[in-house]
Image (spheres, rainbow, N blue to C red):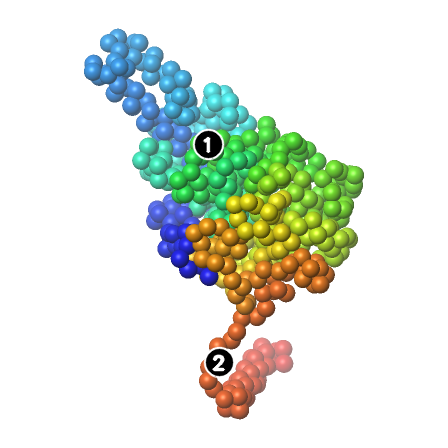
Amino acid sequence: MAGRNRYNAGASKATGANLGFEEKLWQAADRLRSNMDAAEYKHVVLGLVFLKYISDAFKERYDQLSLWASDPTSDYYIREPRERYQVLEERDEYRAENVFWVPKEARWSFLQSNAKQPTIGKLVDDAMVAIERDNVSLKGVLPKDYARPTLDKQRLGELIDLVGTIGLGDRENRSKDILGRVYEYFLGRFASAEGKKGGEFYTPRCVVRLLVEMIEPFKGRVYDPCCGSSGMFVQSEEFIRQHGGRIGDIAVYGQESNPTTWRLAKMNLAIRGIEANLGPHHADSFHNDLHKDLRADFILANPPFNMSYWGGEQLRDDVRWKYSVPPAGNANYAWIQHIIHHLSPRGIAGFVLANGSMSSNQSGEGKIRKNIVEADLVDCMIALPPQLFYGSAIPACLWFLAKNKRNGKFRDRQRQTLFVDARKMGHLVDRVHRELSEEEIARIAGTYHAWRGEPGIDAYQNILGFCRSATTEEIAAHGHVLTPGRYVGAADVEDDGEPFQAKMARLTVKLEEQFLESARLEAAIRNNLKELGFG
């Protein structure tokens, strides 16, 4: 199915940040953590990484201006040293190149030269305050708690020396997005270390990549109502670059309710130079929608799974509940309707939800799902493999909603929905986490775009056990349940050629051997317990 098409391009690339030094940097930084929780240490490390980045970028621009101002053949040449210095300290010369202005007390060279001083915590806090003061877009964003008594200043100094070993903001490394990849790698590791809480700010890269490859946000307004650390936006920008598009062709809007995660998002976007409207502060999308009038062309989201306390009782008459009022005890269908409400007339949305959202009939959820299906909004449903998400064992799925399936450019898929069962995909990257490979992402996305009839892609066909296109009438016959397994069927099992009688005889003998071994182990355990006085 995913044979010769554009979704196989670059399939050998890894899905995670894997430059080699990120793991070494993480291990070194983690050794300095001592007894500090990952949730707390995250802001210590990422704040310094951000500071190093903007300081490197500033220094490169400073050195460039200095060279030009000293060169008699340059248009920037200034004979008088005092005037030359004034130009080097002219803020507009940096802002014109999208470089943050870094005051003297915040420059990395100054901080690193004082890394061994007992006052280093206060110096870092002062640096953060100074940067926010001189860069309006960073106001209220940077961490400023390095002077607290509980943060070991010797270890802080060692961490500053460690971060100082890598060039993050120079032009060559910016072009490779080295800082972005280090930042993302650390976010992923912190998410893993924090367990369940980590999933609140970080969506696994492979899941984001699949969402982006599916909806292809080339041009228009991109929105995430629960943006976490902004991974969706980062991947959208990366997708555009990889496919030769222009970054300025999309406008980014987001919202995040957790104040510390909102700050992480602002920093994550700032290090990549991505302009985004995340609102002037953190805010709850349900109760303080900062983008009420926005109708987005693309929506990407990973809402909190099965959120039980979301204040639904205060929103019973909300204009967003077009397809019926969502239950107060679970926000899944509130998120779905919030997303639909913010879609433009030709908009498309891709988002993550718990598997239960595909089949639940509790508290009126089945009625809402039926209304959404009958309104012909459900474009595609994907069942994901287990163990993709940090800190959550809840099985998850991807929903894709389209406001207008009748697209003149592609095949008319009105009153049809594509179902993809990807539960058996993915590979373990450690004992508890699984990842989709680039090839698997390409296969799923290629299947979807073939189904939509996009040019230059192999013709779509149903594949038993993997994908099937179903009509709205068929979905209604299944009680409007959207679980892909109901529609794709079971894949054919290859016949191994062993006759049934022979196979049963062999398996019976093997089972008997296992019964005997089980009895032997039980006797040994009982004997050990008896010797310990517990017989």
Q: For this view, does 482 lie left or right of residue 298? A: right
Q: Which of 526 and 333 is in front in this view?
A: 333
Q: Residue flagged by tag 1: what amino acid is it?
A: Gly
The residue positioned 74% from the left and 43% from the top of the image is: 322
Q: Which residue lies furthest to the left in this view?
A: 73
Which residue in the protein does label 1 denote? 248
Q: Residue furthest front?
A: 408
Q: Position of residue 428 (x, y in %)?
A: 46, 61
On residue 472, the disc is none
Q: Can residue 14 be seen in this view?
A: no
Q: Which element is circle 2 on?
A: loop
If the image is split into quadrants, where does the C terminus sit? Answer: bottom right
- Measured Cα–Cα span from mark 1 to mark 2: 54 Å
Q: Which element is circle 1 on?
A: helix
The residue positioned 26% from the left and 19% from the top of the image is: 68
Q: Nearer the viewer, residue 288 or 261?
A: 288
Above/below status of 126 relative to 35: above
Which residue in the protein does label 2 denote? 495
Above/below status of 293 relative to 489: above
How many marks can you see? 2
The residue positioned 38% from the left and 49% from the top of the image is: 18
Q: Where is residue 242 in the image (x, y as percent from the top left)?
A: 40, 43
Q: Which of marks 1 and 2 is nearer the N terminus?
A: 1
Task: Classify residue 98 by image quadrant.
Answer: top left
Q: Residue flagged by tag 2: what amino acid is it?
A: Asp
Above/below status of 97 relative to 11: above
Q: Is residue 233 visible?
A: yes
